Image (cartoon, rainbow, N blue to C red):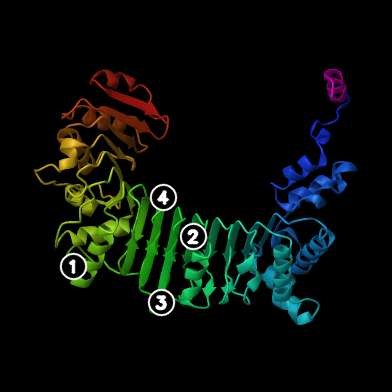
Amino acid sequence: MSERGVACRRRTGEDMISLLPDHLLCQILSDVPTKTAVVTSVLSTRWRTIWLSTPVLDLHTDDFPNFTAFASFISWFLDFSKGSSCLHKLKLDLVSKRPIQEIFIESSWDLAFVRGYLDPYYLITDWINKAVTRKVQHLDISYPWIVEMMPLSIYTCETLVSLKLQNVPLADSQYVSLPLLNTMHLVENIYASDALLENLVSSCPVLEDLTVVRKGDTVYNFEVLRVRSQSLKSLVVVLSGREWWYKACRVAVIDAPGLNYLSLKDNKFTSYVISSLSSSAKVDIDVSFDVERSGQTTLIDSSKRSALRSFFSMLSSVRDMTISLTTLECICLYLKHEPLPQFPYLIRLHAVLSNSDLGNLPNILESCPNLKSLVLELNNFRKEELLIFSSSAPECLRLSLECVEIRTPIRGAVAEIELVKYFLENSAVLKKIKMRLRRGIMNNESNICMQLLRLRRCSPCEVVVEELEDTFQGLDFYSELMNGCFFKDL
């Protein structure tokens, strides 16, 4: 179109987006929920039916007054568009956020079933089967509670790229083939057997992103969790729940040499087998090893020490590790018996420590001889507690540690100042130490900064103090008191 034509349309108020061809408009509408796409039908005569050509059905049950209307719309849409070549995405979220009385009185699945005019389980199976027939690529189903078995057609959908299921029972199948599946998220599901999950993963030759979540009140009905994949790049495993729901599941086997990211959150497992973990993998650990801490004198028995030793030995090749408060409490108990395994390749460590365990930090750092970056978060910090470190500095402080970040805002406690002093006085190659100030009155923050600035340094490092609010005005002149000290506002 000429520039004059475009200018003319602008003067008459016609929108430019309507000039796009239908296939581009359909592509735009495919990126928004179906409810939003339907609203565009009131824009003009041309827009009235464009949304019907989008190869996407993305709905939430709360978009409708009741389940009957929800089901009727889905069935109508799938029948209306059955002549289309494919269905790119089917996303159905049936987890209602309405008040519980409204769900059970006005839109309950069971109520609709009792009245006899529709069977929700049959309908959902029918919708999924139709989507598979239409060569669906993205299937995302969230149920509010466990329902009948998912249709077996999902196991042989050769076009499926992403599969996300929540609160569904998965039946055994003799044949599973998902040649294009790249992403699989399985949340709170029930598996017919231990072999099913392993079979699902191994039948996805290009799977890169896997999440397995079992928590809350879901019964833990498998004894061994096995994940074996040559293609997997990201694995997230969440296994937490109430103690009385646990059965005999005490083993997790992970064999995925291509992993770039591994996250484990587990409050009961005691045995892991992790093999062939890449040195480039980033790991995020929140595992309790079934250790209950009660007081400062708690010791862990030999079997749990063996499990912890074996677990961290299997992670000895990683370069980036995040460790939760729960896991570090177990580590500190372990250190009462013996040193941690070595992490010779670890470059970055992010650790959450309680104040009572902070004295074990040098012992933890002794296992990281080549550490370059350390991020600390302080939990359950009590201002009155003192901090005493061993006189000898770990090897990484003398030879490799370049950056320290204390993310928890500093309040000026003696232990906090001692922690900063420890790094400044013992880190021979430190380039930067970064801290934050907890909000407070101006004079208190000024005193904290003066204490930090006066600390002796082993190396000419940069000290960065970030403030959480604009309560730190007028303190820039302190940066001139010491070389290499800078203040920065968030």
For label 2, the residue is 211
In the drawing, what numbered circle is on residue 260? Answer: 4
Q: Nearer the viewer, mark 4 or mark 3?
A: 4
- Residue 127 visible to the viewer: yes
Residue at x-position 21% and y-position 58%? 332
- Number of numbered markers: 4
Q: Is residue 108 left or right of residue 274?
A: right
- Pick whichever of labels 1 and 3 is earlier in the sequence: 3
Classed neighbour count for the residue bearing mark 3: other residues with Cα under 10 Å, few (<14), some (14–19), many (≥20):
some
Q: Nearer the viewer, mark 4 or mark 2?
A: 4
Prevailing secondary structure class for the magenta stretch in the rendered image: helix
Residue 349 location in percent, x, y? 30, 46
The magenta segment is 1-11
- Pick whichever of labels 3 and 2 is earlier in the sequence: 2
Q: Quadrant of the C terminus?
A: top left
- The local secondary structure at tag 3 comes to loop
**Residue type at tag 1:** Leu
Q: Quadrant of residue 151?
A: bottom right
**Residue type at tag 3:** Glu
- The local secondary structure at tag 4 comes to loop
For label 3, the residue is 223
Residue 39 or 132: which is nearer the viewer? 132
For label 1, the residue is 299
- The local secondary structure at tag 1 comes to loop
